[in-house]
Image: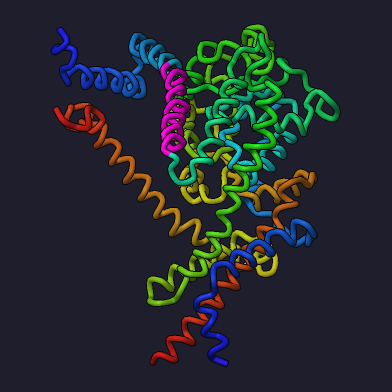
Amino acid sequence: MSSFFDKFENIDRRWIYLLSWIFVLFPLIFPLGLPVPINKESQAWFKAINDIPNGSVIVFSPMFGTSGMPELFPMTLATMHQLWSKNVKIIVVSFWAEGPLVFQQLLNQMNPTAAPYNKVYGVDWIDLGYIPGSEPAMRAFGEDMKKAVAKDYKENKNLSEFPIMQNINKASDVSLVISIETGTPGLTEWLRQWQEPFRTPIIVGCIGVSAPGMAPFLQSGQLGALLPGLTSSAEYELLLNRKGLAIAGVDAVSMSHVLVVILVVLGNVGYFVNRGKKK
Amino acid sequence: MSNILRRIEIPIFLTIVATLLQVIPYYVDIPIINDTANTVNLWVLLVVAWATFIGPLSLMQVHGKTVQKRSKGWYFSVVVLVFTVVMSIAGLPIAEIGLGTKNAVYTWLFTYGQTPLSGTMYGIIAFFITSAAYRSFRAKNIEATIVLVAGLAMVMYNAPIFTATWPGFRTIGQWIYDIPNMATNRAVTIGAALGAIALAVRTLMGIERGYLRGGSD
């Protein structure tokens, strides 16, 4: 019997890869509908967007590339759905080169001009594309938007031609920054260049591994809300009553975590059985 | 004349001016310095835009040599070179002749090439993380046991299947997240900030020269 357990100490990695593949793929093909409890992070995110006063101007920033899409695209879709369902004016701008292309993929799936949103480009929202220059660019954009960006990304027209930009010149004219991000530039740069000098509130959606590093800024109040990873995105979709990509993927998250726990337990059983034998 | 232009004091002086222009407006409101700093920030946008060309050029140089020497895996470099050229040309911002990021070839390659490939690369990490967790989380001593227990608690905290089964997993994970994690991350953040300040002061004083000619005079 012990020879059975001691094999658990060194399971070939190829078996682990195969099990990972099965545990992730199975719930994606056959959704299990596992329960998803709603926690405070997703509630705070929902409330932060819900509480934006009517007519406010906000900045929405997709600060991630294609590698971040599996984890961040569902929350981007859900957030834009909630924003476009409200009466707020949205300036879309990215300081990540792939940001505008990621946002274009969103536009391929959601049409803001059609029902139920019925938003008008240039009046209700505008896409300014990518501004190169990382942190100094964020500062320059915050100081004078029309100097930092001459033309919009979608129609290539001067910003002053759009009604949405008539009374918007700098970061202090913006009511909220929503940044969906994977790294640098990201939260710390927003804090240094927008939140501290202009007192512009910021909320951030991020990949799960970034969340522990951002938590101190949430507790200090510099960050208004934090939506970390796919699980929180799934909770947010439930709050919106709009099941999407995150709900589809959260079963796979659960099952992959179950596998990790099983393997760690088996590994330790094998380790202790073998240690007992050696003694 | 050329000897004067080669003097190391010139880049140090430029660094000091550029740094002070960013630092002073943060603390003191002097309109002329603020305006100058804003103008310099706009210059940065231009400099970075031009620096973007260095990336593809460097990439082509490295992979060009690999193909030329027929080094191991040279055929992968051919793929890199071909798609770098195709995407660079298709993505040139000349909308009048149909090029740019809205160009059909560029969009197709981005949507059906880069996006799934990047997602796949990111997804592959799951296999390595599972394998690494299995091998590293062993209760070999007190320290390793603490890491094992904390690690498993966070795994369960992040998976709805566990928190829905027993809400205590959420409470335990939240405590680890809010107390030990917060304290450690604060220490790391403050430590890194102090280090950055020290580095900035050394650079401003011309002591730190690692960014100049490899640090030599």
Q: Reply above or below: B69 against B185.
A: above
Residue A20 spot, x, y in % from top left: 63, 63
- The C terminus of chain B is located in which quarter? top left
Residue A278 lies in what quarter of the image?
bottom left
Decide if residue B35 is on the left or right side of residue B203. Answer: right
Residue A216 lies in the magenta-colored region: no
Q: Residue at x 49, y 23 (%)?
A: A132
Q: Main secondary structure of the magenta part?
A: helix
* Observer able to see residue A47: no
Q: Reply above or below: A242 against B40.
A: below
Decide if residue B108 is on the left or right side of residue A9. Answer: right
Decide if residue B182 is on the left or right side of residue A68. Answer: left
Residue A95 spot, x, y in % from top left: 53, 27
* Observer able to see residue A127: yes
Q: Nearer the viewer, residue B46 or B164?
A: B46
Residue A224 spot, x, y in % from top left: 56, 39
Q: Residue at x 60, y 70 (%)?
A: A15
Q: Residue at x 57, y 63 (%)?
A: B155
The magenta segment: B47-69
Q: Nearer the viewer, residue B115 or B82?
A: B82
Residue A13 lies in what quarter of the image?
bottom right
- The N terminus of chain B is located in which quarter? top left
Residue B63 lies in the magenta-colored region: yes
Q: Residue at x 52, y 51 (%)?
A: A209
Residue B33 spot, x, y in % from top left: 33, 12
Residue A197 lies in what quarter of the image?
top left
> What colouring method underlies this structural image?
rainbow
